[in-house]
Amino acid sequence: MAVEAYFEDIEDKIIRVLRSSKYSVKICVAWISGKIYTPILEDLANRGVNVELVYDNNSTNLRHGVPLSNKYKTYAIDTRLSSSLMHNKFCIVDDEILITGSYNWSNKAKDSFENIVVIRNEFELIKDFLHEFYDLIAYYDAFSSNYVRKCHCGSNLFNLGILGQESGLYDESKIDVWSVCVKNNHVSHLGEEYAQHLRAQLGMKYEPDWCLETYDKDSMLSEFQQERSRSNSLQNYFNSRSGLRIHAIGTIAMDNWNGHMEWDEEPEYIVNIFWRDMYLRKLIPETLYDDYFGGINEIISDHV
Ligand SMILES: [Zn+2]
């Protein structure tokens, strides 16, 4: 592994890394200048490099022009919440070099105090960024297809399944389905569903079969493909089953287990969400905390 930090001539460093690419460039930045980067990205595409660009759909980008071209794919991300941004600034080259830091790929950023780090061959880390990149593209696809329902308060809604214990020969479990509003915790109980072998399907029983000593680019990419395909098959499972639509699966967990056992603290419960619809992943939190008199408390109280 090699890590380098840069605080000066950042644009030049980025362009050098881009030009060194052999087969793929994945860029995910809030702001990017078309004037600077279109010719570079088109050059790469012309010599067969697969270029993909994710950027924030904001007025600055519209005004100054992003590097649009029919030679590569671009995805303008709209965050749906007017005040928030797709604020990432990272780039993956040939699945082995990661550039990340404070620097926006804009003309203005050159005048600011900024940093980037360039990280090579840190494959576990690069895999996380690959997932994020493709999750954002899945999110982009969802936005185009109007996937998200709105609460009466204007916030986004998702259907949360609270997974019960598995029992019986077919590992059957009950799923209580709740409609949850992301911002103001408006909830309503929609009904009950039943599923078989769900924990196995959700990867809760999954053991990676690679050995750490041989974790290289090939093993990372094959593991990455396995994880994507598991996440796609789960997606298909939840899309194709009849009954209530489910966008996320969680369980109720005690957040202060040690304090409760050792100090006799009052138990505090949370909802741990361990599967999220890939199209809604960016809207659904990983953890829902007890809001005491609100909707999340209603869900928790119903299950403990
Ligand atoms: Zn609401």
Image: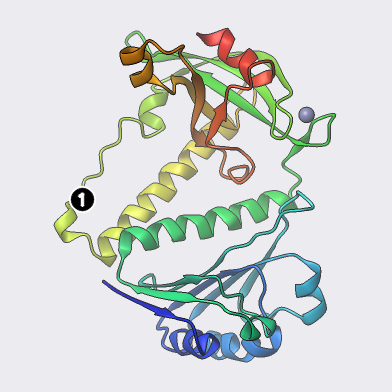
Query: Which residue is pictured at 38% across the width and 54% down the height?
Result: 225
The residue under label 1 is which amino acid type?
A: Trp
Picture quarter containing residue 206? top left
Q: Is residue 287 left or right of residue 258?
A: right
- Mark 1 packing: few (<14 Cα in 10 Å), some, or many (20+)? few
Q: Is residue 245 left or right of residue 174?
A: right
Image quadrant of ligand 1?
top right
Colour setup of the view? rainbow
In this orientation, which residue lies closer to the viewer: 148 or 213? 213
Query: Which residue is pictured at 65% across the width and 89% down the height?
Result: 36
In this orientation, which residue lies closer to the viewer: 291 or 134? 291
Q: Secondary structure at mark 1?
A: loop
Q: Name the residue tied to disc 1.
A: 210
The relative height of residue 91 versus residue 141 in the rendered view (above or below) is below
Give x and y (percent) for residue 135. Answer: 54, 53
Give x and y (percent) for residue 151. Answer: 80, 30
Query: Which residue is pictured at 55% across the width and 87% down the height?
Result: 11
Give x and y (percent) for residue 25. Answer: 49, 76
Query: Which residue is pictured at 56% across the width and 15% down the height?
Result: 300
The relative height of residue 232 versus residue 90 in the rendered view (above or below) is above
Q: Is residue 170 visible?
A: no
Q: Is residue 281 visible?
A: yes
Give x and y (percent) for residue 281. Answer: 58, 43
Beta carbon of the mark 1 residue lies under 8 A of ligand 1: no
